[in-house]
Image (cartoon, rainbow, N blue to C red):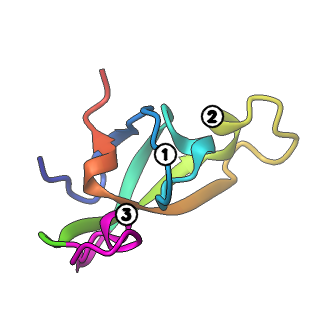
Amino acid sequence: MSFAPGDIVRVVDRPHDGHHRTPAYVKGRTGTVERLHDRFLDPETRAYGADGTPPRQLYLVGFDLWRIWPSYPGRDDDRLLVDVFEHWLEAPK
């Protein structure tokens, strides 16, 4: 599945032992694709000696802070931008 800037995505909320780059506080949260980066070797498998292939698409995803932390005291339009690999993203349910 591929996404484009402006698409609404949900970060998959699945357990993962060991190294991964997806912050726990965005798992299960919905955000908006801001930008497509390039494809990169998978750091989750490279951390354990594999070659990281096939390369995976990396996205910049924006999250409203109040959606991540409901008691966030800042402005309603404050956002967090996180790089997330495609295998951690899905269309929202």
Q: Which mark is residue 44?
A: 3
Q: Residue at x 38, y 36 (%)?
A: 12
Q: What whole-number distance in Å separates the C-alpha atoms at marks 2 and 1?
A: 25 Å
Separation of disc 2 and disc 3 at Cα?
A: 27 Å
**Chain-order first, disc 2 or disc 3:** 3
Q: Amino acid at mark 3?
A: Glu
Front tag of 2 and 3: 3
Does the magenta segment cover residue 41? yes
Nearest the camera: 74 or 23? 23
Q: Point out the stretch of residues depicted in magenta.
A: 36-52
Reading the image, the residue beneath label 1 is 17
Tell me the SS state at disc 2: helix
The Cα atoms of the two marked residues, 1 and 3, are separated by 10 Å
Task: Give the answer, above or below, for where 34 lies relative to 71.
Answer: below
Q: Residues within 10 Å of mark 3 (few under 14, many from 20)?
A: some
Mark 2 vs 1, N-terminal side? 1
> Could you say which disc has been placed on residue 67 in the image?
2
Tell whether 80 sits left or right of 34. right
Residue 61 against residue 15 in the figure, above or below: below
